[in-house]
Image: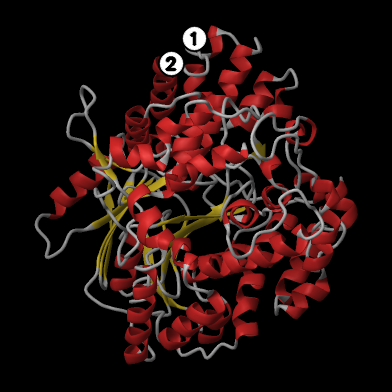
């Protein structure tokens, strides 16, 4: 096998055993890493109804077919599991260096099962795999963990790569993230699952490179593709100097930038936190680069903190989502304050998207009089109150008081506790908080959020770009007619990138059909045709969807909060628009080959070679009637 090693490490935390098992060649070809391989293992190994925070759940830390190869931006890994936040399949991705290093050690991924009776960590150095006590590490934040593990192992030829959870993961908070290289695999509570297994960290050091089917052609392709990325105005200018926040001003003009819990109003201070503002205020004119492994785009920038007690500490970011949700959505327009909050959240091991939404939701509840200071740790939790906002972040990270518990466990749990109709304006889908593009800004964005198998997600797919930012494939954001086919196509393309574990920013210049198809074939020798390769993405989407259907997910869950369907946007180019998900859902299901309640049909599963899933859905009672109930 080329490109992939065909090897996975299986760790049983209950008995402390570690084994290396093979991935069969045909399995690797059908599920070439990332999302597809994780979903394949998850639906076979995680039984229906398993407690996500119990020992019978699994956590899959997998690389992709192009991770650690010379392919442009091939640096990501996935953390996949049954989510404690949504109780369905979730796959969360991180960049940096940890994923490639695992590949350099000779493995395509790690399967974690069972639960240790005491805190442990894992160290991998090529063929040497060890489980060690982590009692002395428990309670430390992720910054401390990385430094301490490197100290414990002493000098190495190159730096160890460390993946860990912070205090939030130890407490099994539902918004807990996994952190590696200041990058977060954050969505869906994957850090809580790692914490439930009493696993604090995994350090890796590798000395190999994955073998390639045709290394000469690979290098010729890489040279040509990197040259194109270095000329593309998005990857060589906008992202390189203004980071992911380069789009913030345009999103604000549309009216889609979240402000005061998705109020539908425009943020009057948006210019203070735009990519241009960040470039000048905290990123040394955009030249404080800290790119992921093998990345020519360099979208990630670092900021040297100045606040008392944090002088000289380094924050990687903040990214657009963090700026928009932890900042703008809470009424905070101070780039340096947002950078400090980002640094703290990475240390605590929390999802900045979900925490930002949850704090803004609680601010909304507070200003509406639905909660008082008895639920806010005594804070005047109003929009824009920077001191209260920072105190809420620290309360969540440290697990302090009612407010800390509410913030660290998401707005759905908070809404259920608060009541008074607050669920109607709690920004979540299937329990997962909504990303930083108001779904009322475009019908494709609305449909994409509502039907996503893991809850609201801006990257599965990023339809907002097609509706407002693309110069080549613009679509009318207010039309519903073409959105089912657009969302189906783009979700399958997005899944393909998640199987390769390549950063999406490469797709600003490189196409799946013309570029990545060549890359995966010269890396692996699989010899995919385009229809075969495209089917990999469709197969991954259907596996994830079937996992949710087996757990009882159906049409009723493919919806947005009432607010987004009944209260129009008040300002911006999308002013007056509301989400119309129900107008599109049936057609979307039909195009996907799913039944009237969004469950993959036996015919579609057979077409994709997923016959083994048909029996699981039948046994689970995933029928239209069951889904309706």
Residue 280 lies, in percent from the top left, at 29, 39
Residue 198 vs residue 1, the one in the foreground: 1
Please indicate, yes or no, whether residue 111 appears anywhere in the rendered image: no
Residue 29 lies, in percent from the top left, at 54, 83
The answer to whether 472 is drawn above or below residue 558 in the figure is: below
Horizontal side, residue 265 vs residue 294: left or right: right
The answer to whether 322 is drawn above or below residue 510 in the figure is: above
x 39%, y 80%: residue: 5
Residue 61 lies, in percent from the top left, at 44, 60
x 38%, y 31%: residue: 338
Residue 619 vs residue 505, the one in the foreground: 505
CB-based contact (under 8 Å), mark 2 and mark 1: yes
Quadrant of the image occupied by residue 239: bottom left
Residue at numbered disc 1: 380
Please indicate, yes or no, whether residue 360 appears anywhere in the rendered image: yes
Distance in Å between CA atoms under marks 2 and 1: 6 Å
Q: Residues within 10 Å of mark 1 (few under 14, many from 20)?
A: some
The answer to whether 378 is drawn above or below residue 281 in the figure is: above
Q: Residues within 10 Å of mark 2 (few under 14, many from 20)?
A: some
């Amino acid at each position: 096998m080329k490109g992939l090693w065909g090897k996975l490490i299986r760790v049983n935390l209950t008995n402390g055993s570690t084994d290396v098992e093979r991935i069969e060649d045909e399995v690797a070809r059908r599920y070439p890493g990332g999302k597809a391989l994780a979903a394949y293992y998850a639906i076979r190994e995680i039984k229906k109804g398993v407690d996500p925070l119990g020992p019978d759940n699994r956590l899959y830390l997998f690389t992709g077919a192009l991770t650690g190869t010379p392919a442009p931006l091939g640096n990501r890994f996935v953390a996949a599991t049954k989510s404690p936040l949504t109780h369905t399949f979730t796959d969360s991705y991180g960049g940096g260096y940890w994923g490639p290093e695992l590949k350099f050690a000779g493995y395509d991924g790690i399967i974690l099962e069972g639960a240790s009776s005491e805190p442990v960590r894992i160290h991998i150095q090529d063929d040497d795999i060890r489980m060690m006590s982590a009692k002395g590490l428990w309670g430390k934040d992720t910054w401390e963990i990385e430094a301490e593990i490197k100290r414990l192992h002493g000098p190495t030829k190159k730096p160890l790569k460390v993946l860990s959870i912070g205090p939030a993961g130890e407490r099994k908070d539902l918004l807990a993230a996994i952190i590696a290289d200041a990058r977060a695999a954050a969505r869906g509570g994957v850090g809580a699952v790692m914490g439930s297994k009493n696993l604090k960290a995994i350090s890796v050091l590798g000395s190999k490179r994955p073998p390639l089917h045709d290394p000469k052609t690979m290098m010729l392709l890489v040279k040509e593709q990197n040259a194109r990325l270095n000329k593309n105005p998005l990857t060589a200018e906008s992202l390189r100097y203004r980071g992911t926040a380069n789009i913030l001003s345009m999103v604000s003009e549309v009216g889609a930038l979240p402000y005061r819990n998705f109020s539908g109003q425009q943020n009057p201070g948006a210019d203070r936190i735009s990519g241009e503002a960040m470039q000048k205020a905290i990123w040394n004119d955009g030249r404080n680069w800290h790119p992921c492994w093998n990345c020519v785009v360099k979208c990630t920038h670092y900021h040297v903190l100045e606040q008392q007690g944090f002088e000289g500490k380094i924050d990687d970011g903040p990214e657009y989502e963090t700026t928009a949700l932890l900042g703008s959505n809470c009424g905070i327009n101070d780039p340096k304050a947002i950078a400090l909050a980002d640094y703290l959240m990475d240390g605590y091991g929390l999802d900045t998207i979900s925490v930002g939404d949850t704090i803004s939701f609680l601010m909304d509840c507070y200003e509406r009089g639905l909660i008082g200071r008895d639920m806010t740790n005594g804070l005047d939790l109003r929009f824009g109150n920077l001191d209260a906002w920072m105190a809420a972040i620290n309360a969540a990270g440290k697990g302090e008081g009612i407010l800390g518990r509410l913030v660290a466990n998401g707005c759905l749990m908070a809404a259920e506790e608060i009541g008074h109709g607050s669920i109607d304006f709690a920004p979540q889908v299937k329990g997962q908080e909504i990303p930083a593009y108001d779904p009322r800004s475009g019908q494709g964005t609305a449909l994409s959020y509502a039907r996503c198998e893991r809850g609201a997600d801006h990257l599965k797919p990023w339809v907002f770009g097609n509706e407002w930012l693309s110069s080549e494939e613009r679509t009318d954001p207010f039309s519903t007619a073409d959105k089912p086919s657009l969302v189906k196509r783009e979700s399958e393309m997005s899944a393909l990138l998640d199987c390769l574990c390549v950063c999406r920013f490469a797709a600003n210049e490189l196409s799946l059909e013309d570029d990545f198809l060549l890359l995966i074939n010269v890396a692996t020798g699989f010899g995919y045709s385009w229809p075969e390769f495209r089917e990999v993405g469709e197969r991954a989407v259907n596996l994830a969807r079937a996992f949710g259907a087996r757990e009882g997910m159906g049409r009723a869950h493919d919806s947005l909060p009432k607010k987004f369907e009944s209260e129009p946007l008040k300002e911006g180019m999308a002013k007056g628009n509301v989400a119309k998900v129900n107008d599109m859902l049936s057609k979307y299901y039909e195009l996907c080959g799913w039944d009237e309640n969004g469950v993959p049909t036996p015919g579609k599963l057979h077409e994709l070679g997923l016959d083994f899933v048909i029996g699981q859905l039948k046994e689970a009672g995933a029928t239209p009637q069951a889904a309706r109930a």
